[in-house]
Image (spheres, coloured by chain):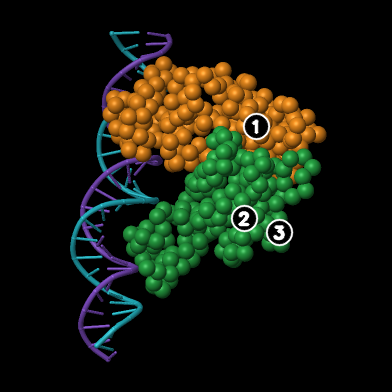
Chain colours: A orange, B green, C cyan, D purple
DNA sequence: AGTTAAATGTTAGTCACTAACATTTAGCGG
DNA sequence: CCGCTAAATGTTAGTGACTAACATTTAACT
């Protein structure tokens, strides 16, 4: 059940955490400090976020992305299908860009331990794409290669976006990243 | 100072850890158990390996790889330089393939938390390659994209190798992985 | 306003990992 | 073979992320 109270508490944790992370760094900030600043107990923190890094790392877009990949013409190479699928999905996702998104990404880009946390999420997305490709008859290894390479390029663009000038859009950077993986002479 | 005693202890820890990981899984195995099985103290474990996952995850090849990338013709695209550099470096690295390598990789492939640990190492390698490309005048984002995409494909091949039939060599799989990132019609 | 389920608090614990200091052990010269 | 010394190990005590079980409060809805 999603009650208003839950949302309020969640928002307060998020505010407190982002603030502390930016002021003292991610590693130097303890969950206890976040809980204190949010006026709650450490236990309550973990009821809203399964781990400390979950405050910064969340991406529930896996099914959407996998579907977009699956919707690409099956006669293309796995890499092309993944590439075009990601570009398509990008259009559906970026509208959500709220103001805190950039703060989050900038923080993630700074800490190696956080990038590890991101990689867990990416791993799930990769698996979703891979499964979808394999279901269409692609060899599992080829599928995993295509998915992981495209996602790695996308992630590189995402992290760069965190510290890019504010007039640079995420969409631009991701397009540029995926363009590098395009077969020579492709236009999209 | 590398004394024989140090090497013995290190080997005993490694044996005990691999054995326990394979029998009970990585997450279900505690450092205390490893220390007990190796006849040492938990503290001593951490003097030989900085973290629990360091027993399985180690790759000191960064400078070698970065150099191989830098040695590729500078008029190629960043992606091509990275791709060819990795293929070159592969020849210098794979001879080290000892019997436990496959056990290690197979274990890593199974646990998400371990793949996160791998990604920390990969991250360092990516940075090394990126720096090298940037030093030659490549745009930082383009460099990061090329490095991360190529490494992601390589990692996918590595993980697949862990559970591949024993007559499949790592070299074959990596070549296949990187071939997918080649411009259309390339031969190497 | 009262009921009740959802949200929070409390307590006690595990596990990875660290710091400071004490103790043992192995490798070395005599 | 013996002692000396530095390297290796042990001990103790602690921090921080995270969990389980149970008690308590709070807010949504009638």
Secondary structure beneath dot 3 equals loop
- Dot 1 falls on which chain? A
Taking the image as shown, residue A95 lies to the left or right of residue A78, namely: left
Tell me: residue A131, above or below residue B93.
above
Q: Which residue is mark 3?
A: B168
Taking the image as shown, residue A124 lies to the left or right of residue B76, namely: left
Viewer-side label of 1, 2 = 2
The answer to which of A107 and B45 lies nearer the viewer is A107
- Dot 3 falls on which chain? B
- Residue B132 position in % (x across, y down): 54, 45
Q: Which residue is mark 2?
A: B89
The answer to which of B113 and B158 lies nearer the viewer is B158
Q: CA distance from mark 2 to mark 3?
A: 19 Å
Asked if the residues shown at circle 1 and circle 2 are in contact, with their CB atoms under 8 angstroms apart, the answer is no
| Residue located at (62% from left, 32% from top) | A177
For the C terminus of chain A, the quadrant is top right
- Dot 2 falls on which chain? B
Tell me: residue B76, above or below residue A104.
below
Secondary structure beneath dot 1 equals helix
Q: CA distance from mark 1 to mark 3?
A: 31 Å
Picture disc at residue A178: 1
- Residue D26 position in % (x across, y down): 31, 18
- Residue B87 position in % (x across, y down): 66, 52
| Residue located at (36% from left, 29% from top) | A22
The answer to which of A76 and C30 lies nearer the viewer is C30
| Residue located at (43% from left, 71% from top) | B8
User: Are the residues under badges 2 and 3 in a single subunit?
Assistant: yes
Q: CA distance from mark 1 to mark 2?
A: 25 Å
- In the rendered image, which quarter is residue C20 located in? bottom left
């Amino acid at each position: 059940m999603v009650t208003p109270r839950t949302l309020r508490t969640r928002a307060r944790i998020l505010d407190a955490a982002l603030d502390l992370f930016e002021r003292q760094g991610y590693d130097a900030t303890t969950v206890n400090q976040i809980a204190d600043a949010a006026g709650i107990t450490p236990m309550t923190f973990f009821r809203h976020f399964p781990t400390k890094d979950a405050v910064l790392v969340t991406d529930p877009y896996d099914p959407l992305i996998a579907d977009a990949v699956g919707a690409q013409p099956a006669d293309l190479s796995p890499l092309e299908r993944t590439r075009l699928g990601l570009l398509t999905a990008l259009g559906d996702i970026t509208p959500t860009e709220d103001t805190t998104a950039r703060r989050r990404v900038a923080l993630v880009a700074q800490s190696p331990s956080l990038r590890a946390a991101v990689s867990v999420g990416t791993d799930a997305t990769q698996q979703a794409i891979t499964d979808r490709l394999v279901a269409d008859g692609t060899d599992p290894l080829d599928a995993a290669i295509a998915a992981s390479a495209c996602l790695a390029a996308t992630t590189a663009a995402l992290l760069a976006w965190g510290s890019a000038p504010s007039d640079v859009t995420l969409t631009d950077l991701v397009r540029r990243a995926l363009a590098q993986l395009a077969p020579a002479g492709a236009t999209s």
